[in-house]
Image (cartoon, rainbow, N blue to C red):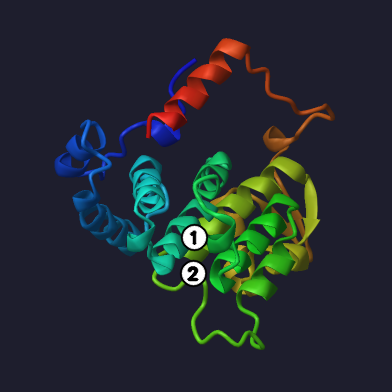
Amino acid sequence: MSVPSSFVRPTTRPDEIHRLLTDVERYNPSNTVLLEDYLARQCANPDSTSNHDLMANLALLKLYQFNPEMLDLDVIRRILAKALISAIPADFNLCLYLLTDEVCKDANIAKLLALRESLERAQFVKFWRDMYDPEDEEEESVVDGIAGFDNGLRKLILAEITATYQKIPLASVQDMVNLDEEAVLRLAKENGWAVDGSVVTLPVKNEVKASVISENVKFEQLTKMVSAANDI
């Protein structure tokens, strides 16, 4: 089994950061500022396919774990927001495992956990409504400072629609991706979907056969995955 893609070095990871992550001194508290600066660069990159370095972000969370006096809740918020739109579902949970119950009680962190639950249940309309709730007392969104967040999320939702539906009302797609009709029609054209009036028809090649979806992971493969995570 190949190494999970989240643990493969991203092409955007600088040599300096890569040396830090593979060095025996990676948990030296002095590395915290370097990893925080690197996270800021990830957040400024709107390309969701190359702007997420899980290994670096997990190392930063572990540094907070070892040095709680250095903990920055806003940095943790941004790490979780990045993991939320990762194409690898396990990324968010790997980050979560390194957080204390006290950290999870923070209003922004708690909201991100609730948003994650909506995504897991494919409750996309609820996700958008809760994320941009006009009655939210917080002045800033929990995804502020994450360039390309909405588009990154839409890619995940479009993949889910493609894997699930053969036909779907156009209005439902609008609600799921939180876009107006004109924007959804552009998305349909880009993805090769046919639109006939108020109905979207997806290509037959995307048909999903009725079956129980399961992952056949052998024990030795599972231990390799766990080992990779623990080596962060």
Q: Quadrant of the C terminus?
A: top left
Tell me the CA gap for discs 1 and 2: 6 Å
Residue 203 x, y percent position in the rendering: 69, 41
Residue 78: which quarter of the image? bottom left
**Identity of the residue drawn at 52% across and 77% down:** 141
The three-letter code of the residue at mark 2 reads: Val
Cβ atoms at labels 1 and 2 below 8 Å apart: yes
The answer to whether residue 197 is visible is no
Q: Which mark is residue 113?
A: none
Depth order, front residue of 228/100? 100
Q: Judge from the rendering whether residue 110 lies leftward or rightward of residue 122; answer left or right.
A: left
SS label for mark 2: loop
Where does label 2 land, which residue?
143
Q: Judge from the rendering whether residue 107 lies leftward or rightward of residue 5; answer left or right.
A: right
**Identity of the residue drawn at 75% across and 43% down:** 164
Q: Judge from the rendering whether residue 160 lies leftward or rightward of residue 64; answer left or right.
A: right
How many C-alpha atoms fall within 10 Å of the one at disc 1: few (<14), some, or many (≥20)? many
Residue 101: which quarter of the image? bottom right
Where does label 1 land, which residue?
81
Residue 226 x, y percent position in the rendering: 51, 26
SS label for mark 1: helix
**Identity of the residue drawn at 78% across and 44% down:** 166
The residue lying furthest to the right in this view is 210
The three-letter code of the residue at mark 1 reads: Ala
Residue 111: which quarter of the image? bottom right
The residue lying furthest to the left in this view is 16
The answer to whether residue 156 is visible is yes
